[in-house]
Image: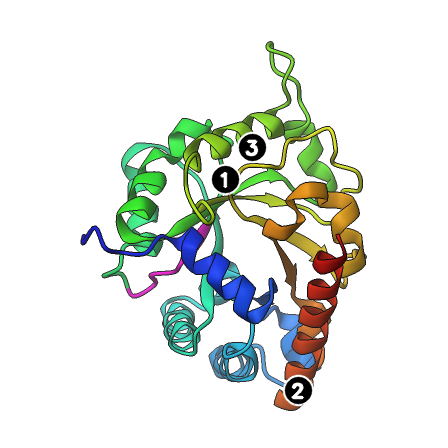
Amino acid sequence: MSGTTEPFGARLRRAMDERGPLCVGIDPHASLLAEWGLNDDVAGLERFSRTVVEAVADRVAVLKPQSAFFERFGSRGVAVLEKSVEQARAAGALVVMDAKRGDIGSTMAAYAESFLHRDSPLFSDALTVSPYLGYGSLGPAVDMARENGAGLFVLALTSNPEGGEVQHAVRDDGRSVGATMLAHLAAENAGEAPLGSFGAVVGATLGDLSSYDLGINGPLLAPGIGAQGATPADLPRVFGDAVRNVVPNVSRGVLRHGPDVAALRKAADRFAAEVRTAVAAA
């Protein structure tokens, strides 16, 4: 791999500055396909994904397909995912593959090769990963990301209520597991400019996070805007000084406006403008 490959963090910083820091999910679950008047089959999946990409890939910084909703259709669904990733990146959006992979050794290396190697049909700009077999288990993904100019988003402080039993657990050194993950990411990103490539997933619905050091010099992918109850105006209060590095994720808040392309674009533009305003005021 050429040493001239631009790191994900630099590409993300530019995209956020130019397009606004918004991530739109591509979540074709059965109920949403039905709302769009589409069948819960590969044809409906393809129509849904193509429409979302057509509507917003030329205007938002990040698109985040949820791999599971494609995988449930088997090889034909994965083929739709491959095409969606290709089309989204061709339109200028960065793609974060939401697959939450996490394993050890050669298995983690294979997951990394699937999503983070430039020769893979599923190559994405970044991948969500789970560190709960130990942060060190992510080593193959970290290495693959570095070699290919890609990034990772590590589950650190997630918005689901069950997450707290692991992420808020306190280690013998007095630091929580979630805080430990943030510290690992800060070390990965040390010295990187304008932004490191190794980010954390931190829920926008979690309220005051001032007890955590979110200054990891990397992006913070923040689910929870829209249907889960958080708003762009909440971002400065939740993320404090790190708010400029937040990539808020909106899925249903935009997708429910489909299948009308103009309505999808209007919704994405509105959320992007609200996020810009909130960040600027922080």
Q: Tell me: residue 262, above or below residue 170.
A: below
Q: As shown in the figure, which amino acid type bears the numbered disc 3?
A: Leu
Q: Which residue is mark 1?
A: 130
Q: As shown in the figure, which amino acid type bears the numbered disc 2?
A: Gly
Q: Is residue 205 something one can see in this rendering?
A: no
Q: Earlier in the sequence, mark 1 or mark 3?
A: 1
Q: Position of residue 50 (x, y in %)?
A: 49, 82
Quadrant hosting residue 216: top right
Q: Earlier in the sequence, mark 1 or mark 2?
A: 2
Left or right? Give the position of 119 relative to 186.
Answer: left
Numbered circle sitting on residue 89: none
Q: As shown in the figure, which amino acid type bears the numbered disc 1?
A: Ser
Left or right? Give the position of 86 relative to 113.
Answer: right
* Secondary element at image label 2: loop
Q: Tell me: residue 260, above or below residue 70.
A: below
Residue 113 falls within the magenta-colored stretch: no
Numbered circle sitting on residue 37: 2
Q: Which residue is mark 3?
A: 182
- Residues at marks 1 and 2, CA–CA distance in whole angstroms: 34 Å
Q: Main secondary structure of the magenta part?
A: loop
Closer to us: 158 or 162: 158
Q: Position of residue 182 (x, y in %)?
A: 56, 32
Point 41% across, 49% down: residue: 151
Q: Residues within 10 Å of mark 2 (few under 14, many from 20)?
A: few
Q: Position of residue 195 (x, y in %)?
A: 47, 48
Q: Earlier in the sequence, mark 2 or mark 3?
A: 2
Q: Residues within 10 Å of mark 1 (few under 14, many from 20)?
A: many
State which region is magenta: 121-127
